[in-house]
Image (cartoon, rainbow, N blue to C red):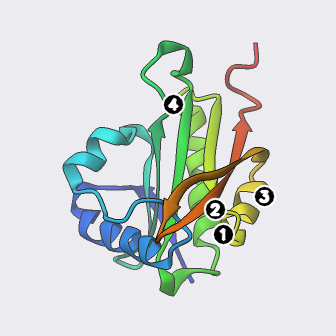
Amino acid sequence: MRVRVDAMRRADWSRVSAIYREGIAGGNATFETEALDWEAFDRSHLSACRLAARAGREVVGWAALSSVSSRCVYAGVAEVSVYVSDAAQGRGVGRRLLQRLVRASEAAGLWTLQAGIFPENRASLALHAAFGFREVGVRERIGRLGGRWRDVIVLERRSSSVGVE
């Protein structure tokens, strides 16, 4: 699949939201049960680090970062979201998105990226590991989804070029 990755635009929202809803429906991507509307997404994600993967004119995946805290000491730390449409999974889209997201995060001055991933989401765990994320722990039974308790594996990636003085 020939894919290009560039900035996510407001006009991409209907497709971005549809891909997010596919992730919700799959049950192993997020605790959320409904997709945000554009305004909520816009408020909660860093504007410098929002990407869309496009196959031709169609958005087939997206990635974005959100702040982990409003405290200034955590200004260089962000949480990763990467979603690929069901039809495009297993074709390198997630790899392209995360590669560009890491570069964009460093250009924005971020020194740590973190992710919380369900243990059942082996593809996402492998993807993050390929880009230098390491497991820092497991949050056991941290939340309920679909009536059952779920664990979350916490991963982080430290930049080798930002915040290394």
Disc 4 to disc 3, how far (Cα)? Answer: 22 Å
**Mark 3 burial class by Cα count in 10 Å: few <14, some 14-19, many 20+:** few
Q: Residue at left 49%, top 78%?
A: 26
Badge 1 vs badge 2, beta-carbon distance below 8 Å = yes
Q: Report the residue marked by disc 3.
A: 130
Secondary structure at badge 4 equals loop
Badge 4 vs badge 1, beta-carbon distance below 8 Å = no
Q: Report the residue marked by disc 1.
A: 121
Kind of residue sitting beneath label 1: Asn
Q: Could you tell whether 56 is left or right of 79 in the image?
A: left
Q: Quadrant of residue 91?
A: bottom right
Q: Report the residue marked by disc 4.
A: 108
Badge 4 vs badge 3, beta-carbon distance below 8 Å = no
Disc 2 to disc 3, how far (Cα)? Answer: 17 Å
30 lies above or below 133: below
Q: Residue 118's mark?
A: 2
Badge 4 vs badge 2, beta-carbon distance below 8 Å = no
19 lies above or below 75: below
